[in-house]
Image (tube, rainbow, N blue to C red):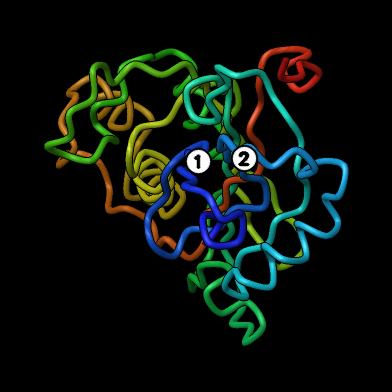
Amino acid sequence: MLSRLLNEPIFVTGCGRTDTGVHATEFYAHFDSTILDLEENQDKWIFKFNHALPADIAIQKIFPVHDKANARFDAVSRTYQYKINKNKDPFQINRSCFLYGEYDIDAMNKVAKELFNYIDFSSFAKSNTQNFTNNCKIYKAEWTVENDLIVFTISADRFLRNMVRAIVGTLLDVGKGKMTIDEFKEIIESKVRSNAGLSAHACGLYLTKVEYPQNYFDVRTS
């Protein structure tokens, strides 16, 4: 689409990949172009891009970065939220996961803190991938209740494929009283995906924040 609108070959690199059905309220992508007025006349270009994009994707801003910028590999942290609806809501279809029953939020928060004590999350990684390492540093893992929604927020320096949905699915077993804190720790230490819970449905997952080094966006191309 960009190649056609800009009339030159364009290769876009996004800040990450998500499964089908997962949402993003913040997402960065970079590309190289010889068009000089992309930022100066960004209102015009944003309108053109959004007009050509599907209805569920929208560009909000265009800005230059340095020549070696990489939206995927330069990110220093990402934050995801998983949203569970306690009541069936037609306006939340494919926007949150409707789950019937009560969940022990305090227990899920207590167990979620154990994630800070580990770096190898092979137990929550999609099998048969070619990751160089399954090590991640988790900065935040917290459940909150927002009206009819139960929301899990997790931040880390990086995430493995399917990792958040696998963690959510396993913590939900805790919330239903099917798993203890010791069993949760044993799952992590086993480093075996089949020991963890089922992956939560994709429709409830959102990429909500991507962070880059300080002053990253102040750099301009020469």
Q: State the residue position of label 1.
A: 14
Q: Residues within 10 Å of mark 1 (few under 14, many from 20)?
A: some
Q: Position of residue 157 (x, y in %)?
A: 51, 20
Residue at mark 2: 28
- Looking at this view, is 93 or 87 the one in front? 93
Q: Nearer the viewer, residue 146 or 5?
A: 5
Looking at the image, residue 144 lies above or below residue 95: above
How many numbered discs, if any? 2
How far apart in space, not on screen, are marks 2 and 1 (Cα)?
A: 6 Å
The amino acid marked with disc number 2 is Tyr
Rendered location of residue 49, percent (x, y): 67, 62
- Locate residue 121 relative to residue 215 in the image: left or right: left
**Residue drawn at 69 percent across, 66 percent down:** 50
Q: Residues within 10 Å of mark 2 (few under 14, many from 20)?
A: some
Mark 2 and mark 1 in contact? Answer it, CB < 8 Å.
yes
Residue at the far bottom in the pictured view: 90
Residue 79 as seen in the image, left or right of residue 12: right
Residue depicted at x 83% and y 60%: 44
Residue 2, image x, y percentages = 56, 56
161 is higher (above) or lower (below) than 188: below
Disc assigned to residue 201? none
Left or right, residue 161 beside residue 52: left
